[in-house]
Image (cartoon, rainbow, N blue to C red):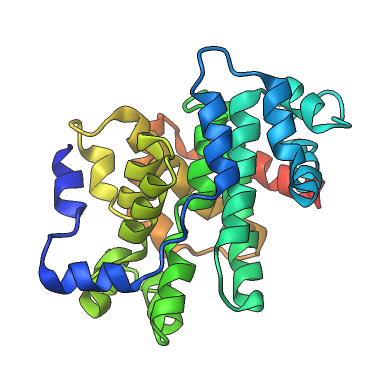
Amino acid sequence: MTTVAAQALPTENAVEDALLRSIRIPPRPSLLVDLQRELAKQDPSPRQIARIIANDVGMSGALLKLANSPFFGAARKAKSVEQAINFLGINQCAALLTGLLARQAIEGKEADLNAFWEISARRAQALVFTSRKLRIAPPDIAHTFGLFCDIGVPLLMNRFTDYADTYDQACNDSQRVFTDIEDARYQTNHAAIGCLLARNWGLSPDVSWAILLHHDYRVLEDPSTDDAIRSLVALSLLAEKGIQRLHGRNMSCEWDKGGDSACRHLGLTEDETEDLLDELNETFHTER
């Protein structure tokens, strides 16, 4: 456990334990259990993975659509799930499928969830793009983290009727740590809840730790924290900045808090950062 991570973990007491029990964490989907069981084998079979996915027709179609997105840079278009697996690789297809299963598992108001998943998909795309450009994290890990880093948000919306107001307040606070605002009101935060879900779903430890720490930018200067986790947090800030730019917003409170530290960790100059964000923006528009 890292120094910053230890401070970020919620303390154990009866009040917080009761609160966590009152927040519904969706169970790991059976399809994901089957997929992870195959992936854990010494020589996973793309054909067997395709059979597992083919049990859900809607999932197969959605996976193909994502696999053929320009963000994954496949030279050819996949016409079947097995082709998608062969073109992109087992791990990347597993990451895409895990994200699709999350969409099925999370409940809430349709309008709120549509907006949430749109941003999450953009973040995941941005993380895949930047991780490949900088060769700094496996794209499947970057994609999964991008989709899941805010997964605690709709869970807290379901639990607290005023959470949307708290979330807006935290988004627009230029000084305080985002999760500190949530902690002060609810004795928990979306990063801790998201980390718990990631662990329950058997996701990579790098993903679950990065979810826990993705608003605590002290981690970027903490040499005791694993470099892979720090890189994911840094890439998430680039993604945040890129999404804000896509929507025509010049200001990002999170970027103002942690952007400089993220660029230092990634070894990017100001000009290199701007060039990378411009490329990301072009790719977003290409997909549209």
Q: How many marks?
A: 0
> Would you identify the image quadrant in which residue 70 lies?
top right
Compared to residue 151, the image places residue 232 above or below, namely above
In the rendered image, which quarter contains the N terminus? top left
Comparing 43 with 142, the one in front is 43
Report x, y in % for residue 230. 33, 37
Compared to residue 141, the image places residue 187 above or below, namely below
For the question of whether residue 228 can be seen, the reply is: yes
For the question of whether residue 119 can be seen, the reply is: no
Report x, y in % for residue 137. 48, 28
Comparing 138 with 272, the one in front is 138
Judged from this view, the residue extending furthest toward the top is: 43
Q: Which residue does the image show at 48% across and 50% down from the upper left?
A: 28
Compared to residue 278, the image places residue 13 above or below, namely below
Q: Which residue does the image show at 47% across and 26% down from the upper left?
A: 136
Image position of 152 (left or right of 51)? left
Image position of 240 (left or right of 188)? right
Q: Which residue does the image show at 38% across and 48% down from the upper left?
A: 200
Report x, y in % for residue 274. 56, 42
Comparing 142 with 97, the one in front is 97
Report x, y in % for residue 213. 30, 49
